[in-house]
Amino acid sequence: MARVPLTVCTGDYDRVRALADGRVGIEGCDVNYLTMNPEQAFYRAWNNLEFDVTELSGSSYILARSTGWDNYIAVPVFPSRLFRHSGIYIRADAGIETPEDLKGREVGVPVYAMTAALWIRGMLQDDYGVAPADIHWRTGGLEEGGRKPKFPPNLPPEIKVTPISDDETLSEMLSEGTLTALVSAREPSCFGPDNPDIVRLFPDFRTAEKAWYAKNRLFPIMHVLAIRRELAEREPWIATSVLKAFTQSKDICLEEMSDVTALAVSMPWIAAELRET
């Protein structure tokens, strides 16, 4: 059987590095492995179907499938998983002490349906009784104006979502006090040690996230891996080969992190952290 050329694109993660550098191959395939910023990969995959195997936003993939867009088929590989209590930023002078204080507030979010915000809304509702309809959501670019969703969700009428203007950014609005809170996967530029006006809603987010995991036993999925549908249907064995290769690459990553002979990453207690986690 002839080998299949396969272009694969993900972020530059430790768990895929053995695939990216060729130590692990994908059975039956000649792999061209590309690493780039995940958001850039999403854009090129959604708009151009540029990659045979690609990392995609989890929530955008679900939304896309709900609209009938099915050019990619997801497989059970999750390149990015992350707890998100750290992703809520507030003004220190806004009178927000608890998650319940977000009710009735205008809260910024780059895209309402983005995966990080989806998990945060679920956490706020399930754990604190703050429903999505309790907040007025303001959408737009975090640091550059004009951001628009690729797949706008069809929301219930009680959910209030209003875009900011194209010449505004969410980070600036939070800094200026136009917004009192912001949900973001990325730290806004207005947050940092030199600006005491902007703080996290959960300052000790690690403790909050560990407690959330102990209660729910879930490690939130942010991104999925997907195969171009035409290829997956033409070569149905590829999905299994891809899954095996990514699993093997992750296993190598974990083995390297646990080796204390010479540390693979620049964190002195990484092996102990790995065992605890």
Image (cartoon, helix red, strand yellow):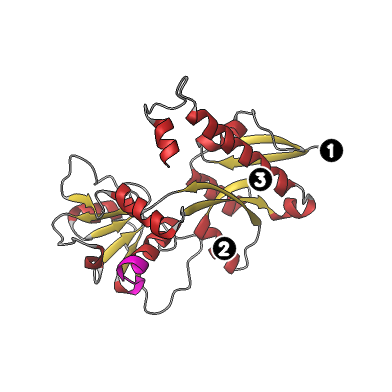
Q: Residue 47: x percent and y percent?
A: 58, 53
**Category of crowding for the residue at label 2, using alpha-carbon neighbours closer than 10 angstroms: few (below 14), some (14–19), many (at least 20):** some
Element type where label 1 sits in the image: loop
The disc labelled 2 sits on which kind of residue? Answer: Ala
The quadrant where residue 247 appears: top right
Q: CA distance from mark 1 to mark 2?
A: 33 Å
Residue marked by disc 2: 64
What label does residue 243 carry, if any? 3
The disc labelled 1 sits on which kind of residue? Answer: Ala
Q: Is residue 65 left or right of residue 93?
A: right
Residue marked by disc 1: 2
Q: Is residue 158 left or right of residue 8?
A: left
Q: Residue 84: x percent and y percent?
A: 37, 53
**Picture residue at 26% right of the left edge, 48% below the top:** 204
**Picture residue at 62% right of the left edge, 35% below the top:** 33
| CB atoms of marks 1 and 2 within 8 Å | no
User: Looking at the magenta stretch, what is its main secondary structure?
Assistant: helix
Does residue 179 show up magenta in the picture? no
The disc labelled 3 sits on which kind of residue? Answer: Leu
| CB atoms of marks 3 and 2 within 8 Å | no
**Image quarter of the C terminus:** top left
Q: Residue 63: x percent and y percent?
A: 54, 64
Q: CA distance from mark 3 to mark 2?
A: 22 Å
Residue 4, above or below 180: above
**Category of crowding for the residue at label 1, using alpha-carbon neighbours closer than 10 angstroms: few (below 14), some (14–19), many (at least 20):** few
Q: Is residue 184 visible?
A: no
Comparing 145 with 195, the one in front is 195
Q: Which residues are magenta?
A: 125-133
- Name the mark nearer the viewer: 3 or 2: 3
